[in-house]
């Protein structure tokens, strides 16, 4: 027995679909008009932890700073040295512009270029710190290099090869999110990991970085994993030349390789570390820093990052090394 029969033709389908599609197209048109006529603010895609760190460091590099010592490098630079503590230890302002291991040496050089433009005559010293795991990579990850490049240029980033992302960009929805919503609506970090639970929102992350003069404490406690066969990638040589060109005139370049947990690499790692550092500093035309190759395992949150206690110790060691290399640092 059949109780109902529905006749659903093309006209009915159009009457059902056209109103919502028209609404979407209207909103998209308004957003595109806002982009074309410059009615929306510039992109500030602080939508997750990695992009928030990048945005914060780009903006810090572009502000007028009193920093005499500037740190650049990967995430081990970001988390192994507390720039607020280093400022107290040295008696002169320090600034940490460490970003992400997803980037490369040329990206760190571009940050330095931004700092140089905003702060002529500074800094007195640049400290480049990278983890041995980052030094053996052929280069940065294309997606994050593109994100960084677009952020530097103040352009919207539309990932290529991703249909949904491209559609959201062309409709103006993703630009609206990165230009407007990210500025006015708190963006929550995932609560499924230690980072999200420690910092909760991207705004909290930025406040912590501002308080620590660009540094960020590693909240995670992870099992040490990975390959400890460290070496220098051949791709570093051309990048080193480009990085060197970004240095302000008269600035001393100091280079170090951040530590790994004791017992994680082989027994000959101290010798490997010394050899890598000598080659790395010669490649950059820089002075090597005498910093520990390994530190106690309980001072690490993960194999690439010291925890808060370890960072305090490492920062103190770095401060002593800088004082010995740059006498009269605080008297300038």
Image (cartoon, helix red, strand yellow):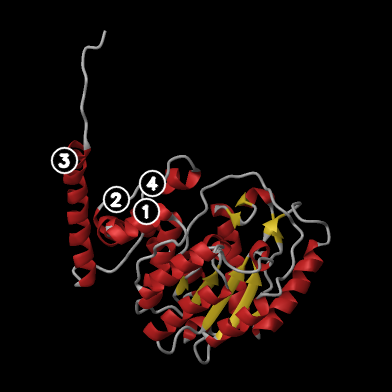
Task: Give the distance between the C-alpha atoms of the residues marked 2 and 1, in whole angstroms.
Answer: 7 Å
Q: Which residue is mark 4?
A: 200
| Mark 1, secondary structure of its residue | helix
Q: Disc 3 vs disc 1: which is toward the camera?
A: 3
Q: Measuring 33% from the left and 64% from the top, which residue is drawn there?
A: 44
Q: Which mark is residue 186?
A: 2
Label 2 or label 1, whichever comes before in sequence order: 2
Choose between 4 and 318: the one closer to the eye.
4
Q: Measuring 37% from the left and 83% from the top, which residue is drawn there?
A: 118
Q: Disc 2 vs disc 3: which is toward the camera?
A: 3
Q: Quadrant of the N terminus?
A: top left
CB under 8 Å between discs 2 and 1: yes
CB under 8 Å between discs 3 and 4: no
Q: Position of residue 197 (x, y in %)?
A: 43, 43
Asked if residue 223 is positioned above or below residue 309 in the image, the reply reads above
Dot 4 alpha-carbon crowd within 10 angstroms: few under 14, some 14 to 19, many 20 or more: some
Label 3 or label 4, whichever comes before in sequence order: 3
Q: Which residue is mark 1?
A: 202
Label 4 or label 2, whichever comes before in sequence order: 2
- Residue situated furthest right in the rendering: 268
Task: Give the distance between the C-alpha atoms of the residues marked 3 and 4, in whole angstroms.
Answer: 44 Å
Q: Which residue is mark 3?
A: 15
| Mark 2, secondary structure of its residue | loop
Q: Measuring 69% from the left and 73% from the top, which residue is drawn there?
A: 290
């Amino acid at each position: 027995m059949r109780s109902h029969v529905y006749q659903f033709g093309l006209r009915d389908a159009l009457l059902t679909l056209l109103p919502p599609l028209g609404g979407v197209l209207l909103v998209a048109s308004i957003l595109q008009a806002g982009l074309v006529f410059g009615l929306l603010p510039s992109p500030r895609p602080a939508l997750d932890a990695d992009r928030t760190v990048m945005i914060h460091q780009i903006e810090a590099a572009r502000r007028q700073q009193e920093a005499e010592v500037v740190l650049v490098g990967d995430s081990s630079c970001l988390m192994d040295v507390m720039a607020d503590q280093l400022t107290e230890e040295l008696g002169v302002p320090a600034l940490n512009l460490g970003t992400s291991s997803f980037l490369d040496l040329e990206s760190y050089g571009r940050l330095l270029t931004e700092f140089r433009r905003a702060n002529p005559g500074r800094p007195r010293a640049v400290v480049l710190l990278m983890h041995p795991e980052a030094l053996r990579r052929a280069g940065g990850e294309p997606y994050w290099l593109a994100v960084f490049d677009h952020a530097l240029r103040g352009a919207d980033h539309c990932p290529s090869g991703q249909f949904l992302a491209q559609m959201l960009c062309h409709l103006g929805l993703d630009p609206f999110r990165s230009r407007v919503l990210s500025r006015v609506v708190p963006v929550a970090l995932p609560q499924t990991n230690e980072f999200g639970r420690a910092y909760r929102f991207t705004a909290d992350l930025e406040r912590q970085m501002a308080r620590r003069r660009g540094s960020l404490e590693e909240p995670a406690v992870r099992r040490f994993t990975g390959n400890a066969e460290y070496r220098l990638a051949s791709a570093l040589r051309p990048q080193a030349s480009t990085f060197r060109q970004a240095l302000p005139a008269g600035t001393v370049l100091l280079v170090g390789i951040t530590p790994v947990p004791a017992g994680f690499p082989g027994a000959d790692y101290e010798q490997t570390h010394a050899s890598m550092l000598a080659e790395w500093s010669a490649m950059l035309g820089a002075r090597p820093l005498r910093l520990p190759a390994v530190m106690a395992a309980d001072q690490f949150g993960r194999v690439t990052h010291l925890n808060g206690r370890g960072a305090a110790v490492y920062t103190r060691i770095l401060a002593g090394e800088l004082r010995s290399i740059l006498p009269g640092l605080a008297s300038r």
